[in-house]
Image (cartoon, rainbow, N blue to C red):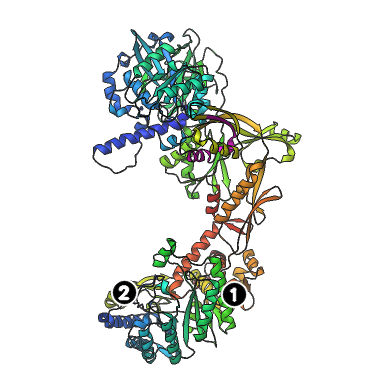
Amino acid sequence: MQLSLIKHQGCATPFLRHLLDFRVCQTRQRSQGCKIACTVIRHRWMKRAPVFCTHNTTNKMISTQADKENIDMSKFPVERIRNFSIIAHIDHGKSTLADRLLELTGAIATTDKNKQVLDKLQVERERGITVKAQTASLFYKYQGQTYLLNLIDTPGHVDFSYEVSRSISACQGVLLIVDANQGIQAQTVANFYLAFEAQLTIIPVINKIDLKNADPERVEKQIEKVFDIPTEECIRISAKLGTNVEQVLQEVVKRLPPPTFKKEDPFKALVFDSNFDHYRGVVANIALFGGYLSKGDRIISAYLGKSYEVNELGLLRPDEHPTDRLYAGQVGYVIAGMKEVKEAQIGDTLYHQKHLVEAFPGFKPAKAMVFAGMYPMDQSDYSALRSAVEKLTLNDSSVTVQRDSSLALGAGWRLGFLGLLHMEVFNQRLEQEYNASVIVTAPTVPYKAILSSAKLIKEHGKEEITIVNPAQFPDRSVVKEYLEPMVMGTIITPDDYIGKIMSICLNRRAVQKNMVYIDDHRVMMKYLFPLNEIVVDFYDLLKSMSSGYASFDYEDAGYQAAHVIKMDILLNGKPVEELTTIVHKDRAYSAGKAMCERLQDAIPRQMFEIAVQAAIGSKVIARETIKAYKKNVLAKCYGGDITRKMKLLKKQAEGKKKMRYVGTVQVPKDAFINVLKRKDK
Amino acid sequence: RCSYCNNKCSYCNFNKYIPRSDNQDVMLECLQRETETLLKLSQVSRITSVFFGGGTPSLARPSTIAAVLQTVTRHAGLSEEAEVTLEVNPTPVGSSKLEDFLHAGVNRFSIGVQVRLRVLGRDHNSQHALQTVAEARRLCPGRVSVDVMFGRPGQSVASWELELDELLSVCDDHVSLYQLTLERGTQLFRQVQKGQLSVPSDDITAVMYDSARRILQKRGYLQYEVSNFARNGAISQHNMSYWKASQYLGVGPGAHGRFVPRGEGDVCREARTQTLEPDVWLREVQQRSHGTRRRIPLTHLGLLEEVLVMGLRLIDGITHQHWQLFSPRADLYQILSSSSEVQDLQQTGLLILDDRGLRCSWQGLALLDSMLPTLLLLLEAYITQGLDNNSDSLQL
């Protein structure tokens, strides 16, 4: 089985590299006895450097036969190949186990420095992403035979579940890691089901048994109860101390089935990851489902139908190790003159020019689930921000970019993301790596409408349309029904918090689908949520009301009919275009009221009274009033005050030029930012 | 204008200068020297008013005042009717010296009166204040101005009205009405920030201002500027010169002036600021006869902006004749009347533009600062556009 992270690739991998670079620098800093935090300059060579570059030299010295110049890949028939990945909830020890497996098989040196080599970004920790460990081919000797174990990693987060499911089809099994202290968490469940549905063999691994509060027995029972896996199948390990890690490798060989592909078949490979390299173009990670691939072969990508010549191919150990050929069941990389990541879409099929094969099913471009507007803080930064966005999307084709402009915020973009985490990571990279100061608007979700008007259907060429921008929301009169995106949310929590959590779920229009005790006092609840209800602050709220103990994850659950309506915000009767939102009927009042209140605070008082209203059609549902100024005059102004006074007035006059006028009401940009901006956590 | 102060008021962020007996002579010498320098530079022939203010100039020796006035007389004409005002802090010491100041040439007193001011940290109580006002009125009947301040911590509309009523019964013919403003860096600002004190809200101070205006009117004080009221025509000539954009010289540490330095052959008015730190100012005057720290030439537009901003503070506003003195080509109608914003302001009764000129209504005066940015933008647009169209004609 293979899981890859690719889209993530776009997203998580470069991040990871960034981190690594940072780590390297930090180490150096320390060795010089210098404690000053430094800004890390990322060199291109560093970017390209393999994840474990710091250990390269030692690596070579201790490595096994496979490290020698030419590995004859034909020596590894499918019977001696195992493709697997590691899946886990955040912080359950996935990276540490990966480190140990690499050490144990000689892929990297055994040293203390490998501790959390693949450390994670703060945003990733907060949001529960699992950072990708580079795909690594391990050589492992078991009972006199050398096996090729391919560890193919995934982002683990459901935002990327599309890619996960694509790459899972390259694997035959997974190691499901669960923390011996924390037990099963929401993401464990989500990941389990992805693997389970792909009919992969699952080896449960209970990690951190060295912890004082470890209770592996309880966790084994949870696993039995929730996943229906017998307790005796669990392997108890401590990745940190290396306890029983060898057993994990043995079980991988023993329990996981080998791939069933034949090298006699025509060449067929799945792209499960891709990287963009400034000098070499796209580096695609592939799993061979049949045949073999040699240097110089001409291959075709099924999605675009473009043909390429293979310039280089090889194994990832985890750094690139060129070989002459790759055979069915094996996993590696290929460089074939692709210029853009779009040319190596995750899930795409590669085949030999001469032998057309059936492409892998279900290939479709990633679908954006969460949209947000993005604008430069200052319009003069527009072109700098544009180039930053372009660079970032070069490596992450799953971000959809649409130019947008707002009367209040100027020129910007409407960006579509796979999920909230994806958005978070993207924004953070933009800020950290490109030092861009951006305004990100509160996220929205794509609604759908089934049109009833024949004329409109003709116009759109279809009955069902997707609405991303509220301005394009079709009127009720021409619509059969509206649909909103749904997600199946999994919440795992100590039972003390059940009451509170049920009530917030209810408030969010969620429908409970299931609730089971996974042990004496931990509960797993399944709720069907409208995606819109969780995009803004649900996760943070859940965390804070459960003192951090509840975990949450969700997966796409299609669309459902919903009574959604368009809500306008009016200032003295004039609609404010950029504040129009689509809301559920039941939430219109509270959403309208909240918006009016925020505006009331954000718009400064003026010489006349301002009515701030939320309206559905012509019906006003909420109102706040900004009272008129009664006095605004500096009550003293003599000779010594003039200069200061003039300066202040000129500044106000300049500010006035930049005001957005809604009718006669002046709305400062700050007010829009305050109202539209995603609230800080 | 010179700065003296012997205490730090909690609301004051003025330049503070605590005089020492040993440098009073040096100070006098420097004030005289700078006065002389600037008078020559401006080449003015007649001084119509002098204002000793900023801090508490009454801490100076009366002889210092007399000497400065002599310097003025020597280098420019100081007419018999010239208004010579001294700002007085109502302390017992201060009031006993008033007569000496009168003999030194002062003919108008401006007194900061505050009652129940413990929280503000002033070193006098209402008793002293009343005594000082009485003494000043005895010496200069009809030529005493009293400052009153509203918006103080803990003040209510009712208590303010009561207080003002009491004050007016002892006041002379001129009243200056101020709102306490919280200035960054003052003790009061910190106390309010920390929540130890609270000042009345904007809505409350708006009512206080309005009720003060009504009470003053009822008592015969006519408002002639945003914060100034006079009975029996006792308006301050000196302050009028600021609002009418006349020329004035600033002498002493931190003083501001606006005049055309014709002595240097210039034709353009400059905004000038004297060095703020008294010790540095003294040294500079000793070395080069003046302590001018900053000179900013006012552009044509800059000058018109000041004429507009200052002029609209007057109840009579800006007459067409007055405007024409500064802007012979572009009249107020041309600049403003086509703007829909101005039309709105006129329709809502806040601003008046008619054959007399441009001015605020009673209600509009309280909202002046909200209207000024609009007017300034129109002025700027008109003038800069005019420059584009007609660049020769405006190179005056």
Residue at left offset 57%, top offset 21%:
A362
**Where does residue A354 sit, x and y in percent of width and height?**
52, 12
**Where does residue B367 sit, x and y in percent of width and height?**
57, 69
Q: Which of marks 1 and 2 is nearer the N terminus?
A: 2
Give the distance between the C-alpha atoms of the residues marked 1 and 2, in whole angstroms. 40 Å
**Residue at the spot of label 2:** B278
**In this view, A57 is above or below B317:** above
- Taking depth in this image into account, of A635 and B90 the one nearest to the observer is B90
Element at label 2:
helix
**Where does residue B102 sit, x and y in percent of width and height?**
39, 90
Dot 1: chain letter: B
Q: Residue B359 carries which label?
A: 1
Query: Is residue B239 something that shows in the picture?
Result: yes
| Amino acid type, callout 1 | Arg
**Where does residue A545 sit, x and y in percent of width and height?**
50, 40
| The residue positioned farthest toward the front in the image shown | A520
Numbered circles on residues, count: 2
**In this view, A73 is above or below A492:** above
Q: Is residue A279 left or right of residue B208?
A: left
Is residue A478 on the magenta stretch? no
- Characterize the local packing of mark 2: few (<14), some (14-19) or many (20 or more) Cα atoms within 10 angstroms: many
Is residue A541 on the magenta stretch? yes
| Amino acid type, callout 2 | Pro
- Taking depth in this image into account, of A606 and A285 the one nearest to the observer is A606
Element at label 1:
strand
Query: Which segment is the magenta one?
Result: A524-550
